[in-house]
Amino acid sequence: MHSDEKKNSYKDSICLIATAVFTALSIIWFLKLRQNWSVGIPKMDLLLPVWITLAAAFLLALFWQALAKAAAASPVPGRCLRAALLLFFCWILFSALKQYSIMNIGSYLFCGLAALGVLGCLLWEPLKRSSALRKVAKGMAWLYLLCAFGCLFFGLNMYLGTQGPAAPARTPALILGSQVNGETPSADLQARIDTAAVWMKQNPQSRVVACGGKGAGETISEAACIQRGLIKKGITSSRILLDDASSNTKENISNAIKILSNSGRKSQALAVITDGYHTCRARLLAKKAGIAESYPVPSVTPESCRAVSIMREFLALPAQYLTNLI
C-alpha cells in the first residue's frame, strides 16, 4: 500500500511539473506572437496550441487523480462530474438543433457524439456492473478525451487565425462567399459584406475581389450579391472585382489571386475578409497558394448560424492541416 501511494505521488509530481513547464512555454510563446502581431508579418504558429493542449492534458491528469481519490471515499464527486458533463452535452445538442434547418455534417457528428455522451452519463452506473460494457465505456471515455483535446487545439488555431496587425495601405482584399437565398444574402454573408464595407472605407486605395459562384437555390452568384451589397453601402463598383466561378474556399482564393494578377494588381499580401471561425483555414489556403502575408479581417458570425458553422469548421480545419502537410 505504501508503495502504491509513493508511486501515485511520483506520478502527481511529474504531472505537476509538466503542467508548469507547458504553461510557462505557452505564456512565453503567446507573448512572442503578440509582439509579432503588433509589428511584423502576420503569423499563425502551431506551437502555442500544442503547448496549451499539453498543459491541459497534464492538468486533467492531476484533476483525474484527485477525483479518483475523492470518488473512493464518496460517490458525490463522480455524480457532480457526470451532471456537469450531462449539461455540457445537452448544451451542444440544443445549440445545434435550434439551427436544424442549416445543419451540416459537422453538426450531425457533434450531435451524435453529444447524444452518446448523454446516454453514457445517464447509464454510467449500470454500465459499470458489466465487465464487457465497462471496457466499452472506458474506450468511449478515451475517445471523448481525444476529441476534447482536438477541439481545444483547433479552437486555439481558429482564435490565432483572427490575430494580426492591420493591412498596409493599398493591400488588396478577398471577400469570401457564403450562402445566398435567391438574391438575398444569408445572415452570414451579410455580416461579411458589412465588415468589408467598413474596411474598404478605412482603406480607400484598396480593391477587393468578391468571391463565390452560384449554387443551389441561388438566383445570382455570391460574388454578385457581395458586389450589390457593397454598392448599397457606398462603395464604387470600380473597386470591386468579381470571381463568380468558384465553389469553395480553395477556389475562392486561387481564382482571386489570378484575377488580381490579370488586373495588374498582383500582390504577395492580401487581407482576408470572412467569419472569425473561418479565418484560420482561409489564411492557411492563402499561404499554400503562394501568398506570403495574409491580414485577417474577421466578421462576427450571426447567432442564428454560429453553432453549426463552428461545428463544421472543427472538421474542415483538421482536413486542411493534413492537406498542408502532404
Image: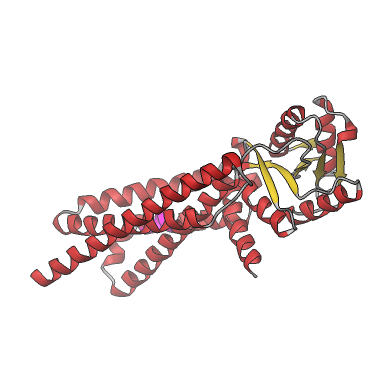
Q: Residue at x 23, y 61 (%)?
A: 12
Q: Quadrant of the N terminus?
A: bottom left
Q: Is residue 220 visible?
A: no
Q: How many marks?
A: 0
Q: Is residue 232 above or below residue 278?
A: above
Q: Nearer the viewer, residue 99 or 169?
A: 169
Q: Residue at x 69, y 42 (%)?
A: 274
Q: Nearer the viewer, residue 111 or 6?
A: 6
**Residue 232 in which image quadrant:** top right
Percent position of residue 252, x then y = 78, 51
Q: Nearer the viewer, residue 281 or 304?
A: 281
Instruction: Answer left or right for 180 relative to 238.
Output: left
Colour scheme in use? secondary structure
Q: Which residues are magenta?
A: 116-120
Asked if the magenta segment contains residue 118, the reply would be: yes
Is most of the magenta stretch helix, strand or loop?
helix
Instruction: Answer left or right for 10 relative to 18.
Output: left
Percent position of residue 284, x then y = 66, 55
Q: Is residue 71 above or below residue 323?
A: above
- Residue furthest left as drawn: 2
**Residue 321 in which image quadrant:** bottom right
**Residue 18 in which image quadrant:** bottom left
Percent position of residue 247, x then y = 79, 54
Q: Residue at x 72, y 32 (%)?
A: 199
Q: Quadrant of the C terminus?
A: bottom right
Percent position of residue 310, x then y = 58, 48
Q: Is residue 136 above or below residue 169?
A: below
Instruction: Answer left or right for 311 relative to 299.
Output: left
Q: Is residue 186 visible?
A: yes
- Residue furthest front as drawn: 39
- Residue furthest bottom as drawn: 132
